[in-house]
Image: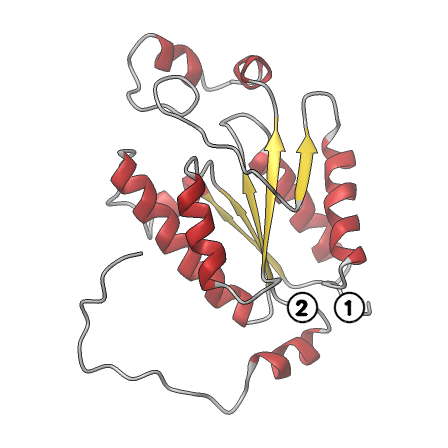
Amino acid sequence: MAEQKSMNITWHERQVDRADRERLLKQRGVTIWLTGLSGSGKSTVAVATEHVLAERGRLVYVLDGDNVRHGLNTNLGFSPEDRTENIRRIGEVAKLFTDAGIITLTSFISPYRADRDAVREIMHPGDFIEVLVDASLETCEARDVKGLYQKARAGEIPEFTGISAPYEAPEKPEVVLDTNERSVEESVSELIGYLEEKGYLGKP
């Protein structure tokens, strides 16, 4: 994790705590961390899950990899060091959202296992659900409407995960969504089923 450089700072407690917010929302704050190759379906599943949960009256928000790099992480590239810092920052944001009682879906390749584990470590037990959105490299390339894989294979995009940079799949994810053949609707149903089974959605 990043070195603490700010000095003479104090953590301030509030009169409204997480339990108060969760009672108000009738749900449990949680970070659902979707990881996988580019084109595996992370963003598609995240957005569709957000829509279904919102329709059910849940407070839910998607933190998307590309969107975050337009603002919060606009100064970061795709070197290993920048990828680590990208995930560190998102982990801290997701932790705040979770403390606010929000069901937070993150959609990031997050290729390094150590970076994802570091995010899990800053969360309270049960606040971090790692979801492997699993699709073969061939499937991801076939879905690549932006032509990113083709550019990566041509050497036009350096350090591209799965081609010229590594991807370390989770060893023990809470959920695995095989999107090679499964539809978006099926993946969303499985993910929401897990949340229901584990009590994250509380009483509707």
Which quadrant is the C terminus positioned in?
bottom right
Q: Which quadrant does the N terminus fall into?
A: bottom left
Q: Visible in this render: residue 70?
A: no
Horizontal side of 129 relative to 15 (left or right) equals right
Residue extending furthest toward the bottom:
15
Q: In which quarter of the image is residue 78?
A: top left
What amino acid type is highlighted by mark number 2?
Answer: Arg
User: Percent position (x, y) of residue 14?
Assistant: 46, 88
Q: Mark 2 points at which residue?
A: 28
Q: Position of residue 17 (x, y in %)?
A: 55, 84
Q: In this view, does 119 lie above or below 97?
A: above
Taking the view exactly as shown, the residue that stands out farthest to the front is: 171
> Tag 2, which secondary structure?
loop
Q: Name the residue under label 1.
A: 202
Q: Nearer the viewer, residue 110 or 150?
A: 110
Which residue shows up at 29% across the image and 36% down it?
Answer: 80
